Image (cartoon, rainbow, N blue to C red):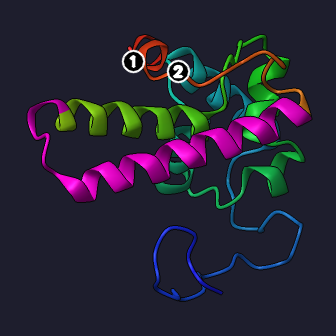
Amino acid sequence: MARMHSRRKGKSGSRRPSVKVAPDWIELSSQEIEELIVKLGKEGLQAATIGQILRDQYGVPSIQNVTGKSITKILIENEFKIEHPDDLINLIKKAVGIRKHLKTNKSDVKNKVKLINVESKIRRLAKYYKNTGKLPKDWRYEPEQAALLVK
């Protein structure tokens, strides 16, 4: 299948095993893992970063297989307010960085195209999150306000 914003085809990525049970070699219980997630959430880390820390430092390959819930659900249950989804925020950060670069390098045509591609991904993702109810229906991506949102 072709890539969205390039002419390359790309290779398929690796897959996790389809087994939905926790491995036997995990030393932590589901309660301890949830406590770790809450502790890392209090430090202000994103859900993806928490997952990487638990995988690399504690040897937990899949939080959902062990606890039965995703990291974001655990954070929401423990009253952490998640205003915007992580993947949307990361795309907005990328767009803000490209805009900052284009202010000083006005003739950089390749990055102008990349900015258009990133902003179209933002709009497409925002449309999905509006339909699923994770964003308010009147939310719009505006580059000037996006810079303030990321800071």
Residue found at x 89% / y 35%: 131
Instruction: State how far apart marks 1 and 2 are (Cα).
Output: 9 Å
Q: Are marks 1 and 2 in contact (CB under 8 Å)?
A: no
User: Where, quadrant-wise, is the N terminus in this rendering?
Assistant: bottom right
Per the rendered image, the range of residues in magenta is: 103-131
Q: Of the numbered discs in the image, which one, if any, rests on residue 139?
A: none
Q: Is residue 100 magenta?
A: no
Residue found at x 14% / y 40%: 106
Q: Give the left or right position of residue 103, taking residue 32 as reference.
A: left
Q: Nearer the viewer, residue 91 or 78?
A: 91
Q: Nearer the viewer, residue 59 or 27?
A: 59
Element marked by disc 1: helix
Q: Residues within 10 Å of mark 2 (few under 14, many from 20)?
A: few
User: Where, quadrant-wise, is the C terminus in this rendering?
Assistant: top left
- Image location (x, y in percent) of residue 116: 44, 48
What amino acid type should be assigned to the residue bearing mark 2? Answer: Glu
Q: Give the left or right position of residue 71, taking residue 67 as reference.
A: left
- Image location (x, y in percent) of residue 107: 12, 48
Question: What residue would you read off at disc 2?
Answer: 142
Q: Nearer the viewer, residue 99 or 24?
A: 99
Q: Is residue 112 magenta?
A: yes
- Image location (x, y in percent) of residue 29: 77, 44
Question: What residue would you read off at disc 1?
Answer: 147
Q: Quadrant of residue 84?
A: top right
